[in-house]
Amino acid sequence: MLNIEKPTLIINKDIVLSNIKTSKELSKKLSISFRPHFKTHQSLEVGTWFKKLGIKKITVSSVEMAKYFSNQWDDITIAFPFNILEIKKVNILLKKITINLLVDSIETIEFLDNNLNDKILVYVKIDLGYKRAGISFNDLKKIKLTIKKIKNSKMLSFGGFLSHFGNTYNSKNKTDISKTYINSINNIETLIFNLDQRINFSIGDTPSLSILKRVPDYVNEIRPGNFIFYDLYQNKIGSCSLSKIAVRMICPIVSIYPKDKKILIYGGSVHFSKDFIIEKGNKCYGYVYYGNNFWNTSKKIGYIQSLSQEHGIIKIEKQDNYKVGDLLSIIPIHSCLTADKMGEYFCDNKKISMMKT
């Protein structure tokens, strides 16, 4: 039995494996490639769970993460526009594995062409309305010039377009997810029509998995990441049920304030991050459960009302027999950031290490 004295992140392997299998089976049904994003779990050990299920290629969010996983994986896409200051690291990686890069500027293309030691596949990042990174889908002139630059280069091969359907995270329910997904697909179709040529598209986000039934023939790859653990945010927008959430933060009760209907836990923003959802007009940093079974969602006693560095304040909604020193199970808002904050987690009483930054 795991001896928990401080905030401790745990995962449920059975749920994780189920989530991986479901997503893999969906990609097979849709006849598209499944390239999961590893930024959520960031673990070599968890990576082997994917391998055992037949996954052969992955996505990461940084050159450092590609380096970390390069001992196990030989086909990695770095889904962040390339930072030219890391060219030496990429040239070293190219000696041992296949790396695919992301570009959205002529300057980066020219730099890569002049400084790469080996040929490499690059994707052009397309912004479909999320406005975080990439060339806008309606900037036809720049897109055509970018493709031409890549095709005329000595060291680069054009792999197609890559996009993140980030607007799905602004959804309120599954209907919203579907509408946002359709809008993004329509923007892709506008681009493909204006280019008058078929170009492969790699798409990535977790919420869209919940509504995918078919994809256009030019979508050849999906790159979800959060799906492996899911979290309360995904549940809130209709992307998953509580039963699919494979992660819990376990925190000890430090003090109880019955008059204020509050509990103080050891567990703050340095453990959870500052992400929150709004419920009934109030900020919520996580659902709180009491009981010996950390995965039982039937005994919700409240929610985290506020966080400071180590302090977590729980608003009590339902009284129970909890006392100082007892452990509470909490579903975090954003599992990716929570795992990154913690730097490790436990599964079946065993510590699982993550990439060190």
Image: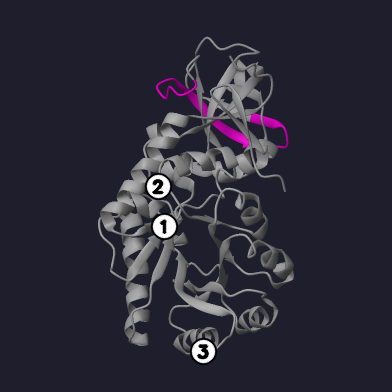
Image side of residue 94 versus residue 33, left or right: right
Question: Which element carries disc 3, helix, strand or loop?
Answer: helix
Q: Where in the figure is residue 285, as x and y percent of width and height?
A: 56, 38
Q: Are marks 1 and 2 in contact (CB under 8 Å)?
A: yes
Asked if residue 185 is positioned above or below residue 284 in the image, the reply reads: below
Categorize mark 1 by other alpha carbons within 10 Å: few (<14), some (14-19), many (20+).
many
Q: What residue do we see at 44% from left, 53% from top?
A: 224
Q: How many marks?
A: 3
Extreme residue in the front direction: 95
- The quarter holding residue 120 reads bottom right
Question: Which element carries disc 1, helix, strand or loop?
Answer: helix
Asked if residue 278 is positioned above or below residue 255 in the image, the reply reads: below
Which image quarter holds the N terminus?
Answer: top right
Image side of residue 57 versus residue 216, left or right: right
Q: Where in the figure is residue 194, as x and y percent of width and height?
A: 35, 86
Which residue type carries mark 2? Ile
> Nearest the camera: 253 or 200?
200
> Distance of mark 2 from mark 3, alpha carbons?
38 Å
| Residue range of the region highlighted in magenta in the rendering | 294-312
- The quarter holding residue 297 reads top left
